[in-house]
């Protein structure tokens, strides 16, 4: 069995476990993310004994750019720690072959697929949350529309004008609904966030990567500002809770993003064949 097949098998299992954990518990255990990273390097190191040092080098070259991106996304509060650690592991799995070939760019296609599928997955998850909390969501959505009433009417007017012009210029039809659709999408996202993603929880239930949505102030002194919580932050908040100085904290939950890693990886593995089959059936 080639090392590539072992890597694929291991990666699918790790991503499946990580996705399940992210959906159920909103965290990814370190043994999964670090396990994938070290296993990928270990498998490449063993394979390089027989097949040459370039196999291990490819893993290092893939790891480094994803390490930089992971740090960038984590410290700009775009991702939690679990997402960032898993991205580093995927860098070691996919690698960048040297000398450069077509296969060297698989890591780029994976990252682009991750961003696109992640956005699509985020919308699907938000629709699910909106349906699950439809009464609260509908009220927040209505209030959001009313909050931007002038802009809403302006975009509606523009849409009808564009539709009228499309009778004379056909190409305008394709852009007629775009501004209004963007407005509704942004309003939808905002309403879902306000109605479904903010929760008061006790510090004992906090996990690394949770987003603190409200500054912690005690006795007029700011103890902690809004940010992604690390292990040290959680320890400090739990200590305050234990001392009776803090009951709950406001957390913004967000979308469990890890399943996007699994979908993006499966797309990289099988997407080309699936697209070829679909095109063959259509044409």
Image (tube, grey):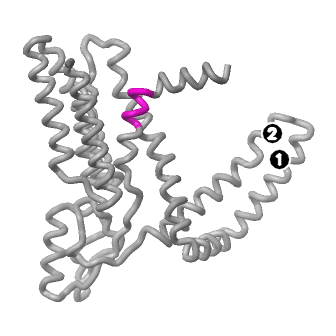
- Residue identified by numbered label 1: 162
Q: Which mark is residue 45?
A: none
State the image quarter where residue 141 is shown.
bottom right
Q: For the residue labelled by badge 1, is the local secondary structure a helix, a strand or a loop?
A: helix
Image position of 97 with respect to 164: above or below? above
Q: Which residue is mark 2?
A: 172
Question: Foreground residue, 224 or 228?
Answer: 228
Which residue is located at x 30 percent, y 13 percent?
100
- Badge 2 element: helix
> Split into 4 quadrants, where in the image is the N terminus?
top left
Q: Which residues are magenta?
A: 264-270
Count residues near mark 2 (Cα–Cα under 10 Å), then give few for <14, some for 14-19, many for 20+. some
Which residue is rendered at x = 52% and y = 53% of the image? 123
Q: Give the camera-side residue of 259 and 150.
A: 259
Going from the N terminus, do you reach mark 1 or mark 2 first?
1
From the top left corner, tell me how far across and down residue 16 is, in percent: 31, 44
> Is residue 280 depicted above or below 146 in this figure?
above
Q: Position of residue 263 (x, y in %)?
A: 41, 39
Residue plotted at (58% across, 25% down): 278
**119 left or right, relative to 106:** right
Residue 189 forms part of the magenta stretch: no
Residue extending farthest to the right is: 168
Q: Is residue 36 left or right of residue 104?
A: left
- Main SS of the magenta part reads helix
Instruction: Tell me how far mark 1 sits from mark 2, CA to CA.
Output: 6 Å
221 and 48: which one is in front? 48
Location of residue 236 (image quadrant) = bottom left
The reply to whether callout 1 and callout 2 are in contact (CB within 8 Å) is yes
**Is 267 a magenta residue?**
yes
Q: Position of residue 25 (x, y in %)?
A: 29, 62
């Amino acid at each position: 069995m080639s090392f590539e097949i072992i890597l694929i098998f291991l990666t699918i299992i790790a991503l499946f476990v990580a996705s399940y954990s992210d959906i159920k518990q909103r965290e990814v255990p370190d043994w999964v993310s670090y396990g994938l990273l070290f296993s990928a390097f270990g498998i490449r190191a063993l394979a390089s004994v027989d097949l040459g040092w370039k196999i291990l080098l490819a893993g290092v070259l893939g790891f480094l750019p994803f390490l930089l991106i992971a740090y960038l996304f984590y410290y700009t509060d775009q991702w939690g720690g679990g997402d960032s650690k898993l991205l580093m592991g995927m860098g070691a799995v996919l690698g960048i072959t040297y000398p450069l070939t077509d296969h060297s760019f698989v890591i780029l296609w994976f990252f682009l697929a991750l961003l696109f599928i992640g956005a699509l997955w985020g919308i699907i998850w938000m629709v699910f949350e909106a349906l699950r909390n439809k009464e609260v969501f509908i009220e927040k959505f209505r209030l959001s529309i009313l909050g931007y009433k002038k802009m809403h009417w302006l975009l509606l007017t523009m849409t009808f004008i564009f539709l009228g012009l499309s009778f004379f210029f056909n190409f305008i039809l394709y852009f007629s609904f775009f501004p209004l659709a963007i407005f509704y999408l942004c309003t939808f996202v905002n309403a879902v966030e306000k109605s479904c993603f903010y929760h008061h929880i006790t510090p004992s239930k906090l996990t690394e990567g949770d987003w603190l949505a409200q500054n912690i102030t005690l006795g007029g002194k700011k103890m902690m500002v809004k940010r992604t919580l690390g292990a040290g932050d959680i320890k400090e908040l739990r200590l305050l809770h234990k001392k009776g100085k803090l009951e709950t904290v406001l957390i913004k939950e967000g979308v469990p993003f890890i399943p996007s890693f699994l979908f993006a990886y499966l797309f990289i593995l099988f997407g080309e064949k699936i697209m070829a089959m679909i095109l063959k059936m259509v044409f």
